[in-house]
Image (spheres, rainbow, N blue to C red):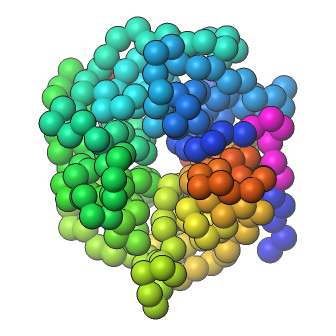
Amino acid sequence: MSYKVEPLPDSYAGLGEGPHWDVATQSLYYVDLEAGKLLRYDFKENKVYKTQIEGQKLAAFVLPIEGKPHEFAVGCARSVVVVKWDGVSPVAKVVRTLFEVQQEFQLNRWNDAKTDPRGRFFGGTMRYVGDEFQFRHGELYKWEAGGDVSIVKGDVGISNGLAWDEKNQKFYYIDTTDYEVKSYDYDFETGVASNPKVIFNLRKTSPKDHLLPDGLTIDTKGNLYVATFNGATIFKVNPSNGEVLLEIKFPTKQITSAAFGGPNLDILYVTTAAKFDQPEPAGTTYKVTGLNATGYPGTYLKA
């Protein structure tokens, strides 16, 4: 298969994360996590807009809110706040807080989050200061509008990639510090995940060689796309047997996440990071074409 990897113009984010394709605006939203910034790639204009969230140093994810075109749920520190942004202005404001978690863990922050196909929030935390492999103080949460936050899973190091497969009634989840992808049976009516099972393992012969799985997305045939933070690669994986169907290679090491988008949902958008003095083009956001696969658009959060 001949796929093509191309950078998006002026798309740099020091810690790019959380790509979310919005059909209504034909835009890819993502974050520069440690800068407290939101970014929007406009497909038609082929241009990236960036905004600083006023008073915030962290922005872990960005989830458009159903029925409110300029409002987004954003993970700032340990709070999920609603940010108002017109998609163009250089400054955006927090207008309210939806909920907060882990007040007793001041050294934690939100990491990856998504909405399930029914509009529920799923997201998790991680240790922000210190060794997240040693201090497994993260948790994975679920939240529905009008309800309370509930814990889906404890004992989490770095809560990361999430994806759902309605056809096969599955939920997929990554805790980076476990070096693996787990599948769960998932009840789409109740939002309950059960029966965890390891379906893809990135452990190598010694800890220093372990690949770190990061973000995750899924195509319409049920194949997973697993980003590797230190591997310069996204693995296309068949979750039924763990077979690697394709290795998508990038010119930088820290691949953080991926989401399908574009008018036909057949472009894979990929965020990267420039942590620990990575050289250029680290931090660039890419588009991958020619994969002969389509995915799902991001789901709006019901809030």
**Which corner quadrant holds the C terminus?**
top left
Task: Tell me if residue 288 can be seen.
Answer: no
**Viewer-closest of 89 and 46:** 89
Q: Is residue 5 left or right of residue 60?
A: right
Q: Is residue 227 left or right of residue 199?
A: right
Residue 194 location (% of width, % of height): 20, 61
The image shows residue 15, relative to residue 28, as above or below, that is below
Residue 205 location (% of width, % of height): 46, 91
Residue 190 location (% of width, % of height): 21, 43
**Which corner quadrant holds the N terminus?**
bottom right
Residue depicted at x 33% and y 53%: 130
The image shows residue 66, relative to residue 123, as above or below, that is above
Residue depicted at x 58% and y 44%: 15
Residue 96 magenta-highlighted: no
Task: Tell me if residue 115 can be seen.
Answer: yes
**Viewer-closest of 114 and 10:** 10
- Residue lying at the far bottom in this picture: please name it: 205
Predominant SS of the magenta segment = loop
Q: Is residue 229 left or right of residue 154?
A: right
Residue 144 location (% of width, % of height): 25, 30
Residue depicted at x 55% and y 13%: 92
The image shows residue 101, relative to residue 223, as above or below, that is above
Q: How many numbered tags mark residues here?
A: 0
Quadrant assignment, res 175: bottom left
Q: Which residues are magenta?
A: 6-11
Residue depicted at x 84% and y 26%: 45
